[in-house]
Image (cartoon, grey):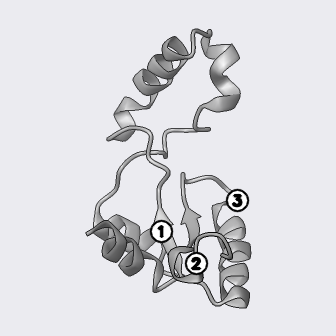
């Protein structure tokens, strides 16, 4: 915050539909609250649609000149790292009511 200015710092809440997403985001939301920072909802998108997850993983491995096994630690852990609609994001982040509007504000 000292380096970039408090007004330029947000806390990212993300979901890739992993079992720990809610717990992780709860901790991050608490931290944001303690620091007086806004939260922003993201998906950490690596591809457009769930059906593209395997192709995206293969392309990432090729770009990294690695086998899929070698690239695995650097790839999204499942088919949840895709773009979502505003309605989907609102449902996924309903427990953090300011996160999706903040994403819309900074993205628009």
Res 37 quadrant in image: bottom right
Distance between mark 1 and mark 3 Cα atoms: 16 Å
Element type at marker 2? Answer: loop
- Up-down relation of residue 102 to residue 76 (above or below): below
Nearest to viewer (mark 1 / mark 2): 2
- Up-down relation of residue 100 to residue 85 (above or below): below
- Crowding near pointer 3: few (<14 within 10 Å), some, many (20+)? few
Q: Nearer the N terminus, badge 2 or badge 3?
A: 2
- Disc ID at residue 5: 2
Nearest to viewer (mark 1 / mark 3): 1
User: Farthest residue in the left direction?
Assistant: 108
Q: Nearer the N terminus, badge 1 or badge 2?
A: 2
Distance between mark 2 and mark 3 Cα atoms: 30 Å
- Disc ID at residue 72: none
Question: Mark 3 highlights which residue?
Answer: 20
Question: Mark 1 highlights which residue?
Answer: 41
Q: Quadrant of the N terminus?
A: bottom right
């Amino acid at each position: 915050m000292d380096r970039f200015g408090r007004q330029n710092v947000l806390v990212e809440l993300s979901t890739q539909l992993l079992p720990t997403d809610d717990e992780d985001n709860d901790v991050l939301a608490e931290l944001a609250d303690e620091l007086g920072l806004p939260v922003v909802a993201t998906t950490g998108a690596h591809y457009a649609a769930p059906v593209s997850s395997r192709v995206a993983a293969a392309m990432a491995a090729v770009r990294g000149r690695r086998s899929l096994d070698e690239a695995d630690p650097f790839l999204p852990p499942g088919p949840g790292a895709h773009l979502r609609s505003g309605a989907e994001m609102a449902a996924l982040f309903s427990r953090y009511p300011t996160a999706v509007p903040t994403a819309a504000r900074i993205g628009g």
